[in-house]
Image (cartoon, rainbow, N blue to C red):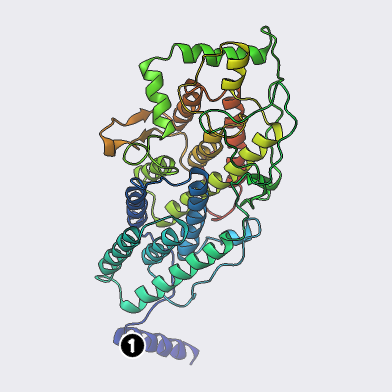
Amino acid sequence: MQLNKILLTVIGISVLYGCHKIDLPPHQQEESAGVVYDWYKFIAKVQRPANPQPVVLLNFRNFAFIGVGLYEAVRNGNKNAESLSSSLYQMPAMPQADAWQRYLWSESANAALAMMFKLFLTLTDANKASIDSMEKVNYDRFSQTTSDAVLHRSQAFGRAIAEAIYNWSTTDKFNLSSVGYVPPPVTPASWVPTLPAFATVGPFLHDSRPFLWYSVTALAPEPLEFSENPSSKFYKAVKEVYDIGKHLTDAQKATANWYADAGGPGVGVPAPYHALSIITWVNENQKAKLFEAAEVYAKTGIAFKDGGIITFRSKYHYNLIRPITYIQRDIDATWLPYLPTPPYPEYTSGLLGAWAPFIQVLKKEYGDIEVTDNAYDWRGLPARHFTSLSNLEDEAAISRVYGGLHYKWTQEVSMKMGKKLADEIADIKLVSNKNKHP
């Protein structure tokens, strides 16, 4: 009798499934990340000609939230994934997908990215219209294989995530202004505003809410002991920058320019698109599917924001003199760095504050793989090929020494700080059964 009941139940379910098209509960799908890669390449083209160019530190921060939002928009499609709200500092609970409804996570990503770009980035009306058009093209493409009910549900969920992420971002106290900042007493070791703008940027950035508890108080170690004695390590480090700057080769100048991303609309690559182009290249080259790609964009985004906060906390805590000030005062009054000196203290490195941890995140995900940096292919410049991500990081670090902006030892410490931050990011447990590279 019991067996007959079970058979009747099975037959009834079979008939039901055969007669009606129903939405099955979501399950782990191997959706392509193509829509995500297309969006990141598209928005780079949109902002590249912007005049004025996006504010570097602000744009890094914005894309950090966008990466986290992308992950939240698709993570319900992976049955083993957890929300970042359970790991990140003061992150509220995010909207939840209906566990008994079907979603197309590519459409959730499509809707979330389109909305977040418009919410976070400085765009013209024409830019926003192009984003709307791109979103519709993707939606229409998905509609060829997915029902309207599923697409509408997926679109609404992506937009709900975008709105929640943006609302959370408005409380992070991100402040690049120097209004109200009182510099410490000037000593021979002190940073002072320099050419070309004699400005001060970011002294309160350390108060911005980070993504990790670790980053609330993280600080670089004490810098090399300052000295004006020609036999001291500090003087020799300064003299090294001076000597390199006096005899720069064309290749060294090209390296400095490559990572400076300067020159304005149509010439440079506004931040953080150079870094994002590398992240996207690596994800594509490693054939990352949607969920893994979203996780990488989220974790590298965390590196962008928290790396900047830790860097600027360290900069204004130690307030260390820039090479241009030391050299012109103690070595050669006519010396100028190859690149313009940024308007904040020297230690630690602003470039490596973002680059060192994001590169280490990629190494944690994929290993120390070969990488191609084609950030300037749109200008016809040849790509740079590296046998490892570590070699890419080394070149980015030395580029700032060639530019006359940092001491070598500052770059070395900055890379160590980036690796430490990336280790903290890697400790975020999002997918319990996923193997990582050591």
Measured from the top left, where is residue 411 in percent x and y? Answer: 57, 26
Compared to 329, does 259 lie above or below?
A: below
**How many numbered callouts?**
1
Q: Nearer the viewer, residue 389 or 278?
A: 278
Residue lying at the far right of the rendered structure = 185
Residue lying at the far top of the rendered structure = 231
Q: Nearer the viewer, residue 195 or 248?
A: 195
| Classed neighbour count for the residue bearing mark 1: other residues with Cα under 10 Å, few (<14), some (14–19), many (≥20) | few
User: Measuring 41% from the left and 90% from the top, which residue is drawn there?
Assistant: 8
User: Measuring 66% from the left and 13% from the top, which residue is drawn there?
Assistant: 233
Residue where numbered disc 1 is placed = 15
Residue lying at the far bottom of the rendered structure = 1
Measured from the top left, where is residue 297 in percent x and y? Answer: 46, 50
- Asked whether residue 339 appears in the rendered view, the answer is yes
In which image quadrant can residue 260 be found? Answer: top left
- Asked whether residue 298 appears in the rendered view, the answer is no
Callout 1 secondary element: helix
* In the image: residue 69, left or right of residue 273: right
* In the image: residue 225, left or right of residue 210: right
Measured from the top left, where is residue 12 in percent x and y? Answer: 38, 89
Give the residue type that dot 1 points to: Val
Compared to 222, does 203 lie above or below?
A: below
Q: Nearer the viewer, residue 399 or 180?
A: 180
User: Measuring 34% from the left and 29% from the top, which residue is drawn there?
Assistant: 384
Measured from the top left, where is residue 434 in percent x and y? Answer: 51, 51
Compared to 22, does 257 lie above or below?
A: above
The quarter of the image holding the C terminus is: top right
User: Measuring 44% from the left and 69% from the top, which residue is drawn there?
Assistant: 159
